[in-house]
Image: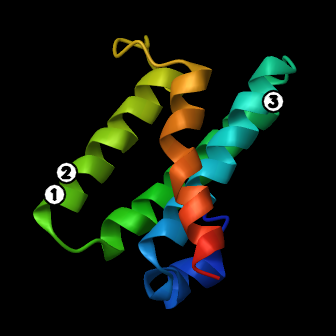
Amino acid sequence: MICQHRDLAAGRWSQMPFAEQMANVGSEVERALNWRAKHNPDYAWRAFERALELLDLTLASARGAARLKELARTREAIVDYFAGANEYGSTEASWRRYFMPFTFAARRDR
């Protein structure tokens, strides 16, 4: 996987509030869902890869066992949904419901 967010990976990401990090991950997941609905698997895959990259940066900067556990499970479920057999039974709606509160929290804190 090619690093799409070089400036964020260089340290800027870890300085962002957690809600903003997750809102950015959610934006990429939203893009992947939208491209998937438009039957454009190439663009959907690219957005999925960017979401994973941002989620990995979030995991690397996370503090606390509970947050690490949730982030690792979220990553596992996203991979299952976009690249696996969807054993967890995720839906587009469930991903939107998961990430929406982070978007509202990030906007509120600005």
Q: Which residue is mark 1?
A: 66
Kind of residue at disc 2: Lys
Check whether the beta carbons of the residues at disc 1 and disc 3 lie within 8 A of each other: no
Please state which amino acid type lies under the numbered disc 3.
Trp
Q: Residue at x 84, y 17 (%)?
A: 39
- What residue did someone put label 2 on? 69
Q: Residue at x 79, y 19 (%)?
A: 37
Mark 3 neighbour class, 10 Å CA radius: few under 14, some 14 to 19, many 20 or more = some
Dot 2 or dot 3: first in sequence order is: 3
Q: CA distance from mark 2 to mark 3?
A: 29 Å
Residue under pointer 3: 35
Choose the circle earlier in sequence order: 1 or 3: 3
Q: Nearer the viewer, residue 90 or 42?
A: 90
Residue 8 picture location, percent across and down: 58, 79
At 34% across and 35% down in the image, what residue appears? 76
Q: Is residue 1 left or right of residue 34?
A: left
Q: Secondary structure at mark 3?
A: helix
When asked about the image quadrant of residue 2, the answer is bottom right
Query: Is residue 1 something that shows in the picture?
Result: no
